[in-house]
Image (cartoon, rainbow, N blue to C red):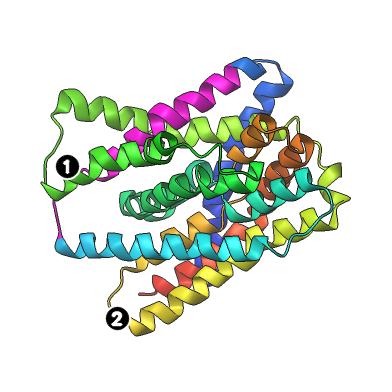
Amino acid sequence: MIESFILVSQQVFILFSLMAVGAACNRLRFLDERAVKGLVEVLMLIVTPCLIVHVFQRPYDNRLLSALGWAFAVALGAHALGILASLTVRLRDGARQSVLRYAVIFSNAGFMGLPLEYALLGEMGVFYGAVYVVVFNLLCWSYGLVVMCGSLKDVRLRTLFVNPGTVGLSVGLPLFLMSVRLPPMIGTPVKMLADLNTPLAMIVIGWYLAKADFHSVLRSGAACLAAALRLLAIPLGVLGAEVLLARLVPGLDGVMMVALVASSSAPVAALTTMLASRYSRDVPMSVGIVAGTTLLSALTMPVVVGLALGIFRQP
């Protein structure tokens, strides 16, 4: 078990080393706000779909298809747990409450989860992590908008079904089901773009960390509660549910179990700040909770993911 903690800690340290590069780019003014927003667009609209397509480039296997179904169910359960947990965050300030409830429900599964899964579990980890990202996208652009703006009017069917996660899955899953490999002239560029996910995501997160104000989070008991729910209570709840599921359904893939815990243990989604700005919510709080939980995740992710790794990947 100790070896699992050490292994996860090493990989998290590597990710934070890349974040330090992003922070340096901020301090040295190598990147400005406009450039970073451009990088975020590249990550969301190009790199993420390419990453999902790439990890589905493997021969069809009935067992993998069954595992994908279980992964989808666990990912839905993890978000349902987040929705229930978010209801414990109650504030008179509706703008701040919306931000913190959104923060509890949605993790940075794409920018933090996928890189960690790739480092620890290889492409199979990302294979399952991609399912979590798809569920994230389905819910964050539907229920998440209701939480953030308090209305159904901003929920667009087009956004619900056409987003980076669903686009990647709609291309990658049929290729997997038909055991079709992309020709090198297409597959190689897709892989090269997919490989950008970890360094670009970490540089972007590091850039934002360098300009974050943590005071609003530290002064707020509700924000501290939201951080504890996001980083510890929810991923540990997912891990407990997986342990029970493994007893009820023997033979489930341990890699899948660890990958989904890693996705659920990631810090608050970066999208929280983008939506808070769009819908005139508490933007400083959103920046603080994203940055604060990202820093704290250097301590919590090794514990939670290391525990999952020790349970499900024992020799």
- Marks 1 and 2, the one that precedes in the sequence: 1
- In the visual, does 275 lie left or right of 255? right
Q: Is residue 269 magenta?
A: no
State the extent of the magenta-drawn residues as a range.
Answer: 35-61
Percent of width and height locating residue 182: 15, 33
Q: Residue at point 41% right, 38% down? A: 157
**Label 2 is placed on what type of residue?**
Pro
Q: Quadrant of residue 301?
A: bottom right
According to the picture, the residue beneath numbered tag 1 turns out to be 175
Number of labels in the image equals 2
Tell me which corner region of the image, top left, top right, bottom left or bottom right, holds residue 90: bottom right
Structural distance between the alpha carbons of marks 1 and 2: 28 Å
Would you name the residue on which mark 2 appears? 250
Q: Amino acid at mark 1?
A: Leu
Rendered view: 94 above or below 158? below
Split into 4 quadrants, where in the image is the C terminus? bottom left
